Amino acid sequence: MSCFDFSTISPEESYAIAKEAHNRGFDFLDAPISSNAWIAREAKIGFMAGGNMEVLEKHRDILESVSELIDYFGPNGTGLKMKLITNQLVACQLSALAEGFTLGLKARLNPNHMMDHLYSSTVFRVMHTRGRGLANKEYEPPKFSLA
């Protein structure tokens, strides 16, 4: 029998639960959810899975029925580690967005016009344009000429 834990608990708690589940003859995978209520209603949530990959593959069809993204990260606890990283990045982005938005309001910019611009600007493309370089330790600065 297999058990998926969709909650966000500590990786250490996940290890302990996985060990106890194994002792009782169960497969246990941590598969925290990346989503919010609006995305969940559209069956577009994401899972960050940790545990036995064969167990994940055996039940992938069930997870796919409610998601658009399933990523496997390794043994028990690794899905939760990725969830914690994701939460940290989202919190930083929201904080930066709120700060920039506040500056724009104080500068008397139209809030909707600001958001329209930001959605189509480099602000929301930075992960696609700079993220892979970071992963590959390519730290070249942007190519802007100061001359």
Image (cartoon, rainbow, N blue to C red):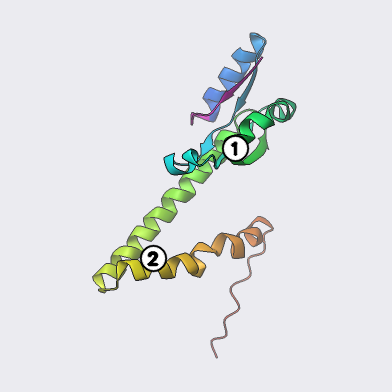
- Which range of residues does the magenta coloring cover? 1-10
Residue depicted at x 42% and y 70%: 117
Q: In which quarter of the image is the C terminus?
A: bottom right
Q: Residues within 10 Å of mark 2 (few under 14, many from 20)?
A: few
The local secondary structure at tag 2 comes to: helix
Q: State whether residue 43 is above or below residue 121.
A: above
Q: Mark 2 points at which residue?
A: 115
Q: What mark, if any, has residue 137 been given in the picture?
A: none
Q: How far apart are marks 2 and 1 (CA)?
A: 29 Å
Please state if 41 lies on the left or on the right of 127 as rendered: left
Percent across and percent down for residue 77 are: 59, 30
Percent across and percent down for residue 9 are: 49, 28
Q: Name the residue under label 1.
A: 48
Dominant SS of magenta comes to loop
Q: State whether residue 139 is above or below residue 40.
A: below
Sooner in the amino-acid sequence: mark 2 or mark 1 = 1
Residue nearest the observer in this picture, 54 or 11: 54
**Callout count:** 2
